[in-house]
Amino acid sequence: MVLFIYNILKYGHLLSMATLVGSFVLVGTSLRQKLKRALLLASFGSLLTGVGMVGIRETILDSTDLDLNHFKIAYKLLLTLAIILIYMRESQHRKAAIRVAGVLSLGITAIAVFWI
């Protein structure tokens, strides 16, 4: 049951990251006005599911063979918080803020995939 919950969190985490990267791709379209809310919700979703996955992995699934890279997790956490801060401070829907957050999202995704 715990593994099922962990996999649900992982699925939500991947959907949140896909929303962040997909919104970055749509920044040049007429949907830009609606992107801020979607990006903010996706950032919070990514943060909450990531923290949930780490919590379950550290406490209940501790007997697994793979150890967590805490430096990698902290780095991804700081970048996610930076994205949230960019959206919270931005009063207008400027392309520059969405682009910066999109680049950070791509960086987080690259860290997740390539940093072992």
Image: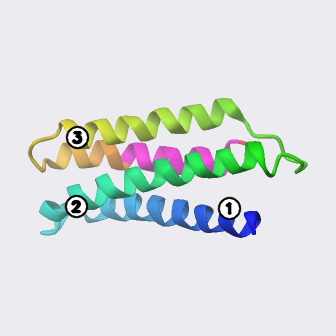
Q: Position of residue 105 (x, y in %)?
A: 43, 49
- Structural distance between the alpha carbons of marks 1 and 3: 29 Å
Q: Quadrant of the N terminus?
A: bottom right
79 with respect to 89 (left or right): right
Q: Callout 1: 10 Å neighbours few (<14), some, many (20+)?
A: some
- Three-letter amino acid code at the position of disc 2: Leu
For marks 3 and 2 on the same chain, the one whose residue lies earlier in the sequence? 2
For marks 2 and 1 on the same chain, the one whose residue lies earlier in the sequence? 1
Residue name at image x 69 percent, y 32 percent: 70
**From which residue to which does the magenta span run?**
103-115
Q: Callout 2: 10 Å neighbours few (<14), some, many (20+)?
A: many
Magenta residue check for 109: yes
Q: Callout 3: 10 Å neighbours few (<14), some, many (20+)?
A: few
Q: Position of residue 30 (x, y in %)?
A: 12, 69
Residue name at image x 33 percent, y 57 percent: 41
- Three-letter amino acid code at the position of disc 3: Met
- Three-letter amino acid code at the position of disc 1: Tyr
Query: Nearest the camera: 108 or 78?
Result: 78
Label of residue 88 in the image? 3
Q: Are marks 3 and 2 in contact (CB under 8 Å)?
A: no
Q: Which residue is mark 2?
A: 35
Q: SS for tag 2? A: helix
